[in-house]
Structures are given as C-alpha cells and as structure tokens.
C-alpha cells in the first residue's frame, strides 16, 4: 500500500507496540491480543527488522547480533548457569552470521559496513532470536536499486530455508509480487484485496 495507509501501524499492533481496538491477534495457535487479553511484546515470539537498521553504533557486529538475546531475558534457557547461556548465545550468533555471510565481519562496527551489510546484521539479529514471526518494515528501502534486487533474492531464499512466518511491509509492487506467498493491499487503513501474487 501507499505511504500512510497503515502498514507500519499494523506491524506495531502485531508486535504489541500499539493497542488493538478491535479483533484478535493469534500467533502459533495462541491469542496474543484482543478480547482475551494482551500478551506483553517480549513474550510474543516476534523479531522486527526496521527500515533504518536500528543497529547500536558502539557495538560490533557480534555484539549487535547478540544484543536481543543478552538483554531480552525471555528466551528459553534463561534459568541456566551464565556460562551455559553465553555458549548458547554465541552458537545462535555464529549460526545467524554463517547464514548471512557475516562471519568475517563479526568484529567490525556498523560504521565500517556497507548498507547491505548493515541490513544483513539487522536481519541476523532477528534470526538469532529464533522467533515465531518475523516483521519486516520496508527493510530494503534504504538500499540502492542493484543492492535491493540482490537482497530481495537473499531474503526470499532465507525465508524458504527458515520456514517461519514473515510479515513484510512495502510500498514497492515488485518487491511485494516477488517475495509474497500471500498479498494484502491496504489503503487508508482498509484491506482492499487479499490473495496470492498470481
């Protein structure tokens, strides 16, 4: 949908950052919002990737990838000894880095990375959390046309490999048609059409 139609607001509602005025939100068979009550955002099993990367400039790639795991306190295993938690976090960080080709960049700061590399770090931070749902808020709009095309292909392959649910917001029709299994067209907060790309 076009700018201002409610795409980002919808993501924020799914994430629990905005209140639900009507209806319900269900994730993995459990109601997380609506008449049955609200599940706090941290307990919804969601990872969000933003348009502006939202990386911590003073942390290197490894620390950015691990940030949500170290500070979230809600992922499985938080009752284990610190040394075991640290090992598990490092394993998830290395898995995400390998999946996205970031292994050689782990000690670099965001300022030393290209736009495409920064976006891969932002996606890697989401992957490391092993969420039930990925929320993508126009993640490619800050990239140039060539890099946007390359990253779109990478995202599609990653989505197939992970097999998790992704809600991807864009105003770019080509992006929507090439990435989506199911499209929802929004205008002024109202769903206009729902269906497969075909």
Image (spheres, helix red, strand yellow):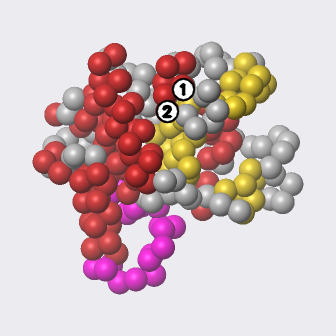
- According to the image, label 1 marks what residue? 176
Identify the element where label 1 is drawn.
Answer: helix
Q: Is residue 24 left or right of residue 175?
A: right
Is 87 one of the magenta-colored residues? no
> Residue 192: horizontal and vertical position, in percent?
77, 22
Give the crowd class for mark 2: few <14, some 14-19, many >=20 residues within 10 Å.
some
> Residue 99: horizontal and vertical position, in percent?
29, 51
Which residue shows up at 49% across the image and 28% down it?
Answer: 178
Q: Is residue 40 visible?
A: no
Residue sticking out furthest to the front: 198
Q: In this rendering, is residue 14 above or below 86?
A: above
Mark 2 vs 1: CB contact within 8 A: yes
- According to the image, label 2 marks what residue? 179
Identify the element where label 2 is drawn.
Answer: helix
Which residue shows up at 42% across the image and 38% down it?
Answer: 156
Q: How many marks?
A: 2
Q: In terms of image quadrants, where is residue 189?
A: top right
Picture quarter with the C terminus: top right
Give the crowd class for mark 1: few <14, some 14-19, many >=20 residues within 10 Å.
some
Which residues are the magenta region?
66-84
Q: In this rendering, is residue 189 above or below 16?
A: above
Picture quarter with the N terminus: top right
> Residue 155: horizontal and vertical position, in percent?
40, 38
Q: Is residue 50 left or right of residue 8?
A: left
Q: Is residue 57 visible?
A: yes
Q: Is residue 131 left or right of residue 101?
A: right
Q: In this rendering, is residue 120 above or below 185?
A: below
Mark number for residue 4? none
Q: Nearer the viewer, residue 168 or 180?
A: 180
């Amino acid at each position: 949908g076009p700018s201002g139609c409610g795409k980002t607001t919808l993501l924020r509602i799914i994430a629990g950052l905005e209140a639900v005025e009507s209806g319900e939100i269900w994730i993995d068979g459990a109601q997380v919002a609506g008449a049955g009550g609200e599940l706090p955002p941290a307990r919804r099993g969601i990872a969000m990737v933003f348009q502006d990367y939202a990386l911590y400039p003073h942390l290197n790639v490894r620390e950015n990838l691990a940030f949500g795991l170290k500070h979230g306190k809600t992922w499985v295993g938080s009752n284990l000894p610190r040394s075991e938690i640290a090992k598990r976090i490092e394993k998830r960080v290395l898995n995400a880095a390998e999946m996205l080709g970031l292994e050689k960049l782990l000690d670099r700061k965001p300022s030393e990375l290209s736009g495409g590399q920064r976006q891969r770090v932002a996606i890697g931070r989401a992957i490391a959390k092993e969420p039930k749902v990925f929320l993508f808020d126009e993640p490619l709009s800050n990239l140039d046309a060539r890099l946007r095309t390359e990253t779109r292909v990478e995202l599609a392959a990653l989505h197939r490999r992970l097999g998790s649910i992704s809600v991807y917001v864009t105003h770019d029709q080509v992006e929507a048609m090439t990435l989506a299994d199911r499209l929802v067209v929004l205008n002024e907060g109202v769903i206009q059409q729902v269906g497969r790309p075909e």
